[in-house]
Amino acid sequence: MARLHVTRVDKDGKPSYHAEESADLPAWGAGARLNVVGQAHPRVEGADKVSGRARYAMDQRLPRQLYARVLRSPLPHARIKRIDTSAAEALPGVHAVLSSINCQSVKWYEEQVPLFDTTLRLVGDEVAAVAAESEDIAGDALRLIQVDYEPLPFVVDLQAAAQPDAPRVYGNAQSNLAGDPQIEHRGDIDAGFAEADVIVEHVYSTQTALHQCLEPHGCTASWESGHLTLWDSTQAIWETRAEIASALGIATHNLRVIKEHMGGGFGSKQVPWKPTAIAALLSKAAGRPVQLLHDREAESLAAGNRNATRQHIRLGAKRDGTLTAISARIELAQGAYRVGGETAMVDGPYQTLYHCPNVHTELIARYINAGPAVAFRAPGFVEGTFALESAMDELARELQIDPVAMREKNYTTAEQQEGKPYTSPQALRECWTR
């Protein structure tokens, strides 16, 4: 029986392994029966879920627990000229109010903007938050907060955001670029197109999609003797612990994140979101536990999305269908902020799906005045595959070749950037056969 052992760890933290024979486990005999793989087993958490015993972040109830609501921007781009929370603070049953008045030190997103900024960049941006004895009282308090907004020019369309005269999501920026373009290439793309007998060129667009988790984003937060506990709806308890500790300026050993069950995440909950930090700060200010979870409107506006894309594709091929060049210029709508986590790898299928010696991809993210993009089930690959496969069909029509036969001609059993074999090299062929 071979066992893998770590022999060393390189400077990038990647381990190296070597195989070593071990005699303490018997080898499988001919016709051996597997007791776990391929056998039916009841889900470990199944009984708790169907009986209602499973506990989610929204189910948490602590002594003296308060409930929070958030006032959100009604405008896609605006500046807060004046905000008055005094009437909300005086309402019986209200225990804490946060806004740009008293919460400027905590920064959020990769842009490191204040948790409650005086510049609002999307419909749904957080203006203020209230913790009260009940959600109804918190809602009444929100209606008492007075805000004077100065509307600013905005852009919500990906193509419009790319224009030189487009409104800037960040007023002092020279453009709406969200970070540097990501460029990947192999071979000689110009030589690949020069070698082609046929070239097709098309532009494909994909729309924004929402995760709409059945359980919304949020948590219950409790400070006790300098220690913070979060019952959070998250896919990443350690990431949440590290980022919340950093944002709030507390030691990680004074912060505990608990997640028993989670009602959907799909990638959107692999990073911490504002409700977690806001609930923690409200709990500290009120001296009592606070629960804050998105309502359905907030979940739609401010909990991330699969971003819209625009993909300009060129494919070059020989008369027999052999690909000689793949070029893709991909623009994606970042939204108003960058949240971290997995990036939308829309360029991935172009680099990996079919054998081609000459590939060039450029991935360009642009800010728009809308909710931020975040990972969404194989982030980017759905959008990229749709566009690439559509272009492959167009190429097959142009060449008058059966589209499956053309794909078979360009089949690859290895990851071409690193030259490593796929673990299931025949999987795509099996899909075509079925």
Image (cartoon, rainbow, N blue to C red):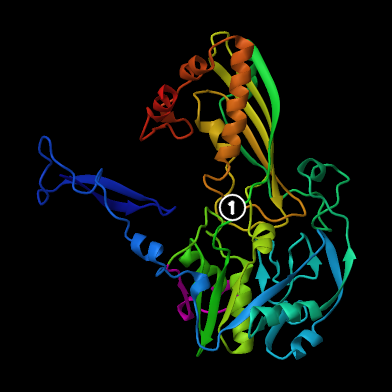
Q: Element type at marker 1?
A: loop
On the rendered structure, is 137 left or right of 16?
A: right
On the rendered structure, is 155 left or right of 49?
A: right
Residue 38 image position (x, y, % from top left): 25, 43
Residue 355 image position (x, y, % from top left): 49, 23
- The residue that appears at 40% across and 63% down in the rendered structure is 49
Q: Which of 104 and 418 is in front in this view?
A: 104
What is the crowding at mark 1: few (fewer than 14 residues within 10 Å), some, or many (at least 20)?
Answer: many
The tally of labels here is 1
Residue 125 image position (x, y, % from top left): 74, 65
- Which residue is labeled 1 in the image? 211
Residue 96 image position (x, y, % from top left): 68, 85
Amino acid found under the numbered disc labelled 1: His
Can residue 166 be seen here? The reply is yes
Residues drawn in magenta: 245-260
On the rendered structure, is 83 left or right of 255?
A: right
- Up-down: is 367 above or below 72? above
- The residue that appears at 50% across and 90% down in the rendered structure is 225
- Up-down: is 289 above or below 216? below
Image quadrant holding the N terminus, namely: top left
On the rendered structure, is 202 left or right of 22?
A: right
Can residue 195 be seen here? The reply is no
Q: Is residue 259 magenta?
A: yes
- The residue that appears at 63% across and 59% down in the rendered structure is 303
- The residue that appears at 13% across and 41% down in the rendered structure is 28
